[in-house]
Image (cartoon, rainbow, N blue to C red):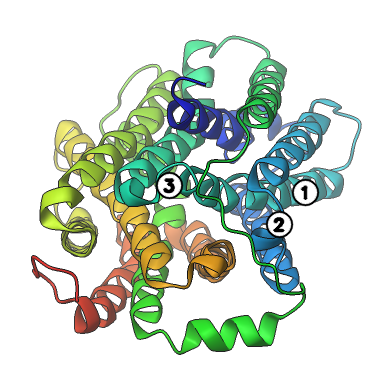
Amino acid sequence: MNNPILLIVVAQMFGTSLWFSTNGVLKQIEQIWSLSASDLGLLTNSVQFGFIIGTLLFSVTGFADKFKPSRIVMLCCFLGATSNILIIFEEISFTFVIFSRLVVGVALAGIYPIGMKLIITWDPQKAPNTLGLLVGMLVLGSSLPYLIRALGVSFDWHYTIILTSGLCSIAGATIYLIGDGPHLVTNEKPAFRLLDQFKELLKNRKYIASAVGYFGHMWELYAFWTCVPILIAISVSQHQIHNQEFTVSLLSFLIIGLGFISCVLGGLLAKSLTSSRVASLSLAASLSICLIYPLMGNIFFFLDLFLLMLWGFFVISDSPQFSAISASVCPQHLVGTALTTQNCIGFSISMITIFLTTSFYETLGTHFVWILLPGPVLGLFFFSRQFGFLKLKQS
């Protein structure tokens, strides 16, 4: 395989397109199951909850470091694609829709964090760069349903769901054919050693600091992504922009998708600035925009768009750097467990803010985004205590 890393990151984009596949067609499915605005948060949180169950399963069993990551990713891609496509059968109940989305979340737990371990097995020394590419593809995958919907706004919504499932299946087959890298390290100790593994990780102050920074980032990230269509819709309505459905879908793709560029650039900058500095600056920038958006929003449509695009750029650029730091400072035989544990807690936190923001945006107006502020502030504070805010060298 000439460039396995490139193929892995493209497969990652295809696989993670399941994440917001229903969000991209919410307007089309709300009449089928009589959905309310708050059901957007419920649909997203069902995936988040499934992801938490999946990452917890991989952490508790130790399977993340016990089996070949390529096989885990492949099986989870096929599981996710199958569960995702069930929603096209309109006679199923909304309860079953929620269950199917939960299973998609479980599958994503084997596609995303295990995919991070897989890509590290090919070149551990370039983890900040390659993880930047991988997380960037997660961003594109997450925003892809909005693009599909924007391009086919008059199409049957079933095609969006079918296409994302098809892409995920292609991802699974691709990962199976690529296999694992030459630097794969598996844990030879028995599985189900959760307590021992956690003790080893909890003693590592650098891993804990990196994880806490990641948790602060996660308090903000997925709630922001979930609310991007809401924020655009508020602005579009306020400024009486025509063709609202197309505008909201296309701009949602652009704002979320900008994170791909920032993740790639962050990986490149980490070579000279270090991962800790890129992560700190990104977190500081996103919390600053979160603070000023309600104060400056709804003055001009293009000002709203500019701020949201800037926010979409910085809200994710720290993520691959936190993962790269965690992977580099923890024992190599526990990389998979460390990353899945970090993801498990981070996505648990994201459920809280998704629930809060989607519940209160109607009453608080754009000020509801201030719900996202505590995470980045606390994450930046605790991360900087260990790594420093503007240190040129890792501690």
Quarter of the image containing the C terminus?
A: bottom left
Residue 161, placed above or below residue 377 = above
For label 1, the residue is 103
Q: Nearer the viewer, residue 15 or 28?
A: 15
Give residue 360's position: percent from left, percent from top.
Answer: 47, 63
Q: Is residue 43 above or below residue 23?
A: below
Above or below, comparing residue 319 to residue 15 in the picture? below
The residue carrying mark 3 is 225
The answer to whether residue 302 shows anywhere in this view is yes
Q: Residue at x 83, y 32 (%)?
A: 86
Q: Quadrant of residue 377?
A: bottom left
Q: Is residue 12 left or right of residue 375?
A: right
For the residues bearing labels 3 and 2, Cβ distance under 8 angstroms:
no
**First in sequence: mark 3 or mark 2?**
2
Labels 2 and 1 touching (C-beta < 8 A): yes
Q: Quadrant of residue 274?
A: bottom left
Q: Which residue is mark 2?
A: 50
Q: Residue 54: x, y in percent? A: 71, 59
Which amino acid lies under the numbered mark 2 shown in the image of this protein? Gly
User: Could you tell me the amino acid type at mark 3?
Assistant: Trp
* Number of the front mark, 1 or 3: 1
Seen in the picture, residue 329 relative to 247 is either above or below; the reply is below
For residue 270, side relative to residue 345 (left or right): left
* Picture disc at residue 124: none
